[in-house]
Image (cartoon, rainbow, N blue to C red):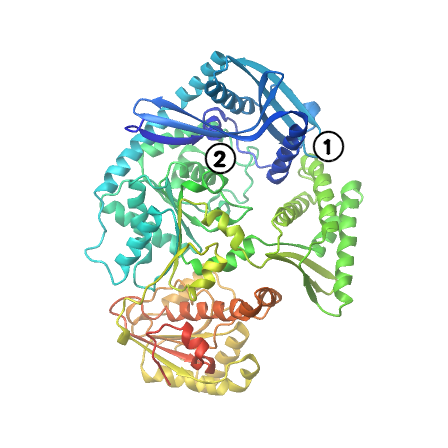
Amino acid sequence: MSNKIIIKESVRGIIEYVLKTGSLDDRYMGKNRALEGTLAHQKLQSSNEKIYAQYQKEVRLEQSFDIEDVVLLLEGRADGIIIDDGSVYIEEIKSTMKSLVLIDEDYNDLHWAQAKFYAYMYSLQNQLDEINIRLSYFNIETEEVKSFNKNFKFEELKEFILYIINEYKKWILLKSNLNSIRNKSIKNLIFPFNTYRKGQRELAISCFNTIKEQAVLFAQAPTGIGKTISTIFPAVKSLGENRGERIVYLTAKTITRTVAEEAVNKLKDNGLICRSITLTSKEKICFKDKTKCNPDYCEYAIDYYDKVNDVIFDILNDDTDFTRVKIEEYAKENKVCPFELSLDLSLWCDVIICDYNYAFDPRAKLKRFFEDDVDKNILLVDEGHNLVDRARSMFSAEIYKSKIMQASKLIKGKVPKLYKALTSINKELIEVRREVQELEVNSMYKKDQYKDLYKLLRIFLKECDEYLVKSVNTEGYDEIRDLYFEIRSFISISELFSDKYVTLVEINRSDAKVKLFCVNPAENLAKVVQEAYSTIIFSATLTPINYYIDLLGGNEKSYRMKLPSPFRKENLKVYGHSLNMRFRQRENNIDNLCKLINKFKEEQLGNYMIFLPSYQYLKQIYERYIEIYSDKDTICQQEVLTEREKEEFINNFQDGANILAFCVIGGIFSEGIDLPGNKLIGCIIVGVGFPKISNEGDIIKDYYEEKGFDYAYIYPGINKIMQAAGRVIRTEEDKGRILLIDDRYFTIKYRSLLPKEWDINR
């Protein structure tokens, strides 16, 4: 066995791959209830523990199968094993919204197939000649159970299992061959550049060693080191030594996904042979006007499961680089859904490039990678500083009273039970609103939950199930369906509620919003960060690093490193002016600020960006500046821009243009924009980047007590400053200048947070 290649697969995965047929259909059918499904399992398992003296739940089973020079290791978890009066039962539990009257013994062959695998494994390990399978359906609404028992001879089970294994054989041999070719190419793979930049080798070695130890690394590596290739290269080398099974490169922005693709392609140009894929959201890659995945609306959904395996087999034999463009081409050629094709194809890929939400968002994450197989992932989290706010958003949820009222009006007189449920929710939200009004404020938060509201929301979900199945294409259906999923999301997040959360209520005239706000996302993130094979979180701005370790799921065992800039210190001149830019003084300093801006840009001609603390102040400064100095060679960022307008804005930065661009700090032009050489020679940063004062910000401040103001405002602000400043020097040849305008930059606090190599000239 040791001389053979070992390939691990899940029982459920292999069953679905071999036996699943039919079309894609995302129309509501009352069955997409993962949360309730888990609860259903727990309830029935608890009941069985009381009934049977010999009962085990969630029993892990595995069995190996020799297929030529490959060992297939199948893993799974039986919901329950019952030993009653000498008879052994393997129980498979399935939750359903369907009336149990409509479910018979032959309801779903895949359910029996999965249980047969577990029965075979258990029988083989315990030398049983026969065994029983109990398939139990648990109705979530009524909590009734309907079970079917079947007795199987061991030889009968063996025949079935060998049939499935034989059907899957070509896939196992394909995967073995692809992995063998990949590993041989990795063995001879060298770093794709002749020399390492300053700090680049140290980062690559630290990543490799972290993966080797199956640990977590937080790395601050400035712009110019080449972070992307320095993390992907050691991760690829680790795959070649059978550490982890795939690399998942997580990003926050499209531009960084492109950089990751380029890095992988650079390695491929140097001899790497591996499968890589970039996942694109359903909304962007869908061929239809609306993302409605069902055979009545979309021709690409028809018979998807009957076609997709052959399509993937052919693709894997022909190609290794699966970009959005290629996936769309394959999907059109074979008339299959491009989004689902990309997800199914990703199962066979060595490098997966995708957005954060595929890994972390409980409402969107890929369960195939981040629940079932999370321990096989080497995670590379790019621009890790962005994950703090994204995580708070992903693990929070909210509902609005106005949406409840709107839904009530749509179904009034049509669906009495549903209308009654919505009316009850509305009354409860009126009481919540009154609670805030009595305090004579517009908002309040508490550390406990409105559990009475949760009960009413669950009643709505229950009543809505029948409506959504029976009322398709009726007036108001889409609005009720959207509200249903919003409330489901709210209830799902409520299951995560802990001392890391608060309930925030905000009122605006007659409307009220109840938000489950995740103040500290660390615990939720840690479930992926810590359970992965290894995780590397990196960015040019992870200052202070303990703040990010604290919030992004790290712990005292997490490694940390901070690399200095690879560029010569004299290439960047940093200046400071102690003008008071606190909120209350901004209005008084408009003319003084305009003079400073003009003076700085006149000292050395070239293209400059000015970063201001808000859109409102941006508008004031720009209008006053052009009033004093004219609008010649000036451009101003608008609050809402199309993709084309963003490109046009950036295209203004050409050699010799002498453009003065007024932008907002933390906006789209202060991060991820690459303007090397003379395209940008300087930036002026006004203020210290504080996030806008908000209820959420003040909640964070209160939550972290003595560290609160730093965590809520100072550290996120410094991050914005560093990102904006990072636009100026992009290559070893670049020279530039920065002007920091705020008296706080000269305090001990801020000097300790700014780069040590910055000598601020007054």
Other-residue count near label 1 (Cα within 10 Å), few / some / many at <14 / 14–19 / ≥20: few
Res 411 visible: yes
Which label's residue is closer to the chain start, 1 or 2? 1
Q: In this rendering, is residue 503 above or below 137?
A: below
Q: Position of residue 662 (x, y in %)?
A: 44, 74
Q: In this rendering, is residue 502 above or below 720?
A: above
- Image quadrant containing the N terminus: top left
Farthest residue toward the left?
Answer: 194
Q: Position of residue 43 (x, y in %)?
A: 66, 34
- Residue drawn 35% across the image and 34% down it: 315
Q: Quadrant of residue 488?
A: top right
Res 29 visible: no
In this rendered view, identify the residue nearer to me: 596 or 133. 133
Farthest residue toward the front?
Answer: 53
Other-residue count near label 2 (Cα within 10 Å), few / some / many at <14 / 14–19 / ≥20: many
The residue where tag 2 is placed is: 300
Q: Amino acid at mark 1?
A: Thr
Q: How many numbered marks are there?
A: 2
- Residue drawn 36% across the image and 53% down it: 258
- Residue drawn 51% across the image and 72% down it: 690
Q: Amino acid at mark 2?
A: Tyr
The residue where tag 1 is placed is: 142
Q: Position of residue 277 (x, y in %)?
A: 38, 43
In this rendered view, identify the residue nearer to me: 217 or 419. 217
Q: Quadrant of residue 73?
A: top left
Q: In this rendering, is residue 669 above or below 264?
A: below
Q: Is residue 282 left or right of residue 606?
A: right
- Image quadrant containing the C terminus: bottom left
In this rendered view, identify the residue nearer to me: 247 or 121. 121
- Residue drawn 40% across the image and 82% down it: 576
Q: In this rendering, is residue 383 above or below 40?
A: below
Q: Distance between the Cα atoms at labels 1 and 2?
A: 37 Å
